Image (cartoon, helix red, strand yellow):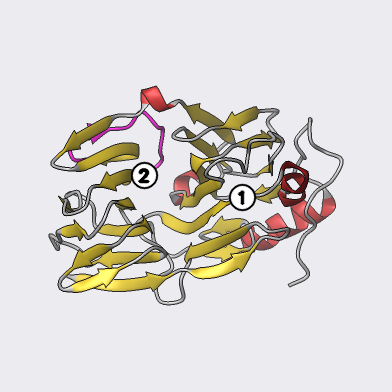
Amino acid sequence: MLDTVIDARNADLGNGLRVRRVLPYAKRRMVGPFIFLDHAGPVKMPPEAARKADVRPHPHIGLSTVSYLLSGGVTHRDSLGVEQVIRPGEVNWMTAGSGISHSERFEDPAAFAGRGLELLQSWVALPEADEEADPAFDNYPVHALPEAQDGGVWMRLIAGEAFGLRSPVRTHSPLFYLHTVLRAGAHIGLPHGHVERAAYVVNGSLEFAGSTYRPGQMLVFAPGSQPSLRALEDSTVMLLGGEPLGERHIWWNFVSSRKERIEQAKADWKSGRIALPPNDRTEFIPLPER
């Protein structure tokens, strides 16, 4: 049974970098622990314009960011001193915990070339017991991630457990996150064993219960339902979900189970108590006025 259909809203991050914002949504704040999902691109830019789209250092608390590229390239730097070039198919999992800052730079001249840049970035809220965990960053190469193929369906498990696969990505709560590619006419269900589950159409189109769903739409299913999705054409679909964590507050880049912790994070960033990346500290995004 279909619980909700979310139509992504267009958002402009500035200098030509536009995204489809899926979560949070007014009528559906989270799916399992997933509290944020942006789909950027595919977008092409000439090399001389790409650097204008850089995301300057900014802070996070109480969550893990998950950066997953379908094409293009991004350079990540954070306040732990990590510098990582993010490439398509890899999983880049940054746990903010008690506080971290990072930047995302488009330094490679080929970052927006070819198919262009296409990035899915999600935020996974942390359980209350882990909200103040030490910050961490992990990169998982493509060859470390389990894949499967059957009946016109290819899948790569980004994180968690699903369809008998288990990802090596270290998480803090039960969840699943899958990159799937369906040939026209292929069917796929949703993994069992997770309370909240959703499917996001990246490209192509899906049919479910007589209705057609297109890129930028997320289908959220009721607990216990056993849907079967059919690809009307070659399609890329992200499947995600997990166990709900309870209410979370979100303001700018901060997530917490406690409103007062959000206020503390605001003050910490404004006063410089959250460190900048040691190799990217000449500029930063200031705390928004609103």
Q: Position of residue 215 (x, y in %)?
A: 39, 63
Q: Residue at x 23, y 48 (%)?
A: 183
Taking 54 as reference, is 286 above or below it?
A: below
Please say whether residue 165 is one of the residues in the magenta stretch: yes
Magenta highlight: main SS:
loop
Q: Secondary structure at mark 1?
A: loop
The quadrant of the rendering that contains the N terminus is bottom left
Q: Position of residue 156 (x, y in %)?
A: 31, 36
Residue position for label 2: 173
Q: Residues within 10 Å of mark 1 (few under 14, many from 20)?
A: many
Residue position for label 1: 44
Asked where in the image residue 195 lies, by quadrant, the reply is: bottom left
Q: Amino acid at mark 2?
A: Ser
Q: Residue at x 30, y 73 (%)?
A: 4
Q: Secondary structure at mark 2?
A: loop
Taking 219 as reference, is 123 above or below it?
A: above
Asked where in the image residue 168 lies, by quadrant, the reply is: top left
Q: Amino acid at mark 1?
A: Lys
Q: Which residues are magenta?
A: 162-173
Q: CA distance from mark 1 to mark 2?
A: 36 Å
Q: Nearer the viewer, residue 122 or 113?
A: 113
Going by the picture, which residue comes out furthest to the top?
Answer: 143
Q: Position of residue 243 (x, y in %)?
A: 30, 53
- For marks 1 and 2 on the same chain, the one whose residue lies earlier in the sequence: 1
